[in-house]
Image (spheres, rainbow, N blue to C red):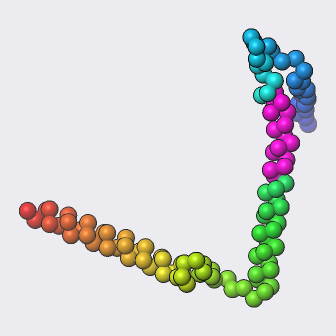
Amino acid sequence: MLQKPRRKRLTVVLSCEAPVVEGSRQVGKPSCVRTMQASYLHQELQKQLAEQRHQKQQQMQAQQIGGGTSQQVADPGLGGFSDYFFDMVGWSAVLAGLCVGWIMLARSQSK
């Protein structure tokens, strides 16, 4: 049985020690430094996102254990209106718009 040859990993070592000098400013060193920091910043971001997900899961579990319901609770800043109310108002507006459009189309066809 033939085996596929393994690819060798190529390791590239970046060095920011020799920046290109163009006139009175250095070109490449700031971007080189940012490139070297990118993997660290990516790891930090992933760690923070994982912590946020973990905290959200803990909150959800605490709500379920604490007697929270699966239905969404109305936001107190909205004066007690629930999502159901806003859904009904939205669909009513869509239906009214369709009716007005249909009536306008029928009137334009009859002339």
Reply above or below: 52 against 12: below
Is the N terminus in the top left, top right, bottom left or bottom right quadrant? top right
> Is residue 2 among the parts visible in the rendering?
no
Does 85 sit left or right of 52 as displayed? left
Classified by dominant secondary structure, the portion drawn in magenta counts as: helix
Quadrant in which residue 29 is drawn: top right
Q: Residue at x 67, y 83 (%)?
A: 70
Q: Give, as a single range, the part of the protein colored magenta.
A: 32-46
User: Percent position (x, y) of residue 85?
Assistant: 48, 81
Q: Position of residue 86 (x, y in %)?
A: 48, 77
Task: Return the residue nearer the eye: 30 or 38.
Answer: 30
Q: Nearer the viewer, residue 20 or 6?
A: 20
Q: Residue at x 79, y 57 (%)?
A: 49
Q: Residue most toward the top?
A: 23
The quadrant the C terminus occupies is bottom left
In the image, residue 87 above or below residue 28: below
**Would residue 44 be counted in the magenta stretch?**
yes
Name, please, the residue furthest toward the front. Answer: 24
From what the image shows, is residue 29 above or below residue 1? above
User: Can residue 54 be found in the magenta stretch?
Assistant: no
Please tell me whether residue 93 is drawn above or below residue 1 in the rendered image.
Answer: below
Quadrant location of residue 9? top right
Instruction: Report whether 44 appears left or right of 93.
Output: right
Looking at this view, is 110 or 92 the one in front? 92
Please state if 83 lies on the left or on the right of 91 as rendered. Answer: right
* Frontmost residue, 33 versus 70: 33
The answer to which quarter of the image holds residue 79 is bottom right
Where is residue 80 drawn, in percent x and y?
55, 84
Residue drawn at 77 percent across, 28 percent down = 31
